Amino acid sequence: MRRVVSLVPSLTEALALTAPDTLVGATVWCTRPPGLDVERLRGTKNPHLRRIVELAPDLVVANREENRERHVRQLREAGIPVWVTDIRTVAGALASLGRLFSACGFPCPAWLAEAGTAWSAPAPAGPRVAVPIWRDPWMWVGGDTYAHDVLTRLGAVNVLADHGERYPALSPHGAAAHGPDLVLLPDEPYRFTPEDGPEAFPGLPSVLVEGADLTWYGPSMTAARRRLAAVLARFSPP
């Protein structure tokens, strides 16, 4: 595999650190690794399809949740092979990455084995948590999502796991009614900050965390567990 275009930020990071010479294009949201020097092909939801076809990549990597089905179809109709991931668990992420590297003829990177080891360790019981991913309208991490599995593997209880939607829309008051001990405020996809987010949860502890630790599957998985576990430990039951 000589030329790859990535439409998924976490997969861009994974490919850039595993086979950097093969990556010829990525989205504007592909911010890792820093200094990545490849052609930018607009965003995950509005990729520059004509330019991608002009680049004639051997493969485009996409994700069922982050990219639109019609864009995948249009690329395939233009004769461009597209690899689409559907990641909902940590184990699924590790397996999917291994399959992708094998299919591309890349050696299995050391960080993938390290991530597997990190996430295989058992975790103590953690706090009850709620995790918003957007506001105006407020949306939250529900069940059957990668972020939910991350939380579960860390011993935390996602209070909105049984809501019935993968990303339920609830007001802060509605989410608080489910009894979380803690609200985790990620810096992506919505960028919560000390001035934008905590004020919506009076009387309820909240902590800012790296969104990539909750949602990116790739090299960041190796340190994500340690960082998130350190946060949750401060609010875990005795």
Image (tube, helix red, strand yellow):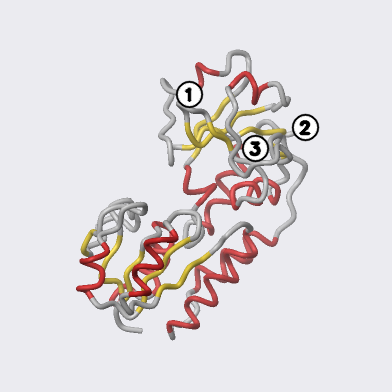
Q: Amino acid at mark 1?
A: Gly
Q: Amino acid at mark 2?
A: Pro
Q: Residues within 10 Å of mark 2 (few under 14, many from 20)?
A: few
Horizontal arrangement in the rendering, residue 128 relative to residue 189 (left or right): right
Which disc number belongs to residue 197? 1
Residue 165 found in image quarter: top right
**Residue at the (68%, 36%) spot, across then down:** 160
Q: Where is mark 3, residue-wise? A: 232
Residue 180, given in percent of the width and then of the height, sits at 69, 27
- Up-down relation of residue 157 to residue 76 (above or below): above
- In this rendered view, identify the residue nearer to me: 78 or 234: 78
SS at badge 3: helix
- In this rendered view, identify the residue nearer to me: 31 or 116: 31
Q: Amino acid at mark 3?
A: Leu
SS at badge 1: loop
SS at badge 2: loop
- In this rendered view, identify the residue nearer to me: 23 or 164: 164
Residue 215, given in percent of the width and then of the height, sits at 52, 50
Q: Mark 2 or mark 1: which is in front?
A: 1
Badges 3 and 2: C-beta atoms under 8 Å apart? no
Instruction: Give the CA separation, mark 3 to mark 2.
Output: 10 Å
Q: Earlier in the sequence, mark 3 or mark 2?
A: 3
Q: Where is mark 2, residue-wise? A: 237
* Quarter the C terminus occupies: top right
- Up-down relation of residue 128 to residue 60 (above or below): above
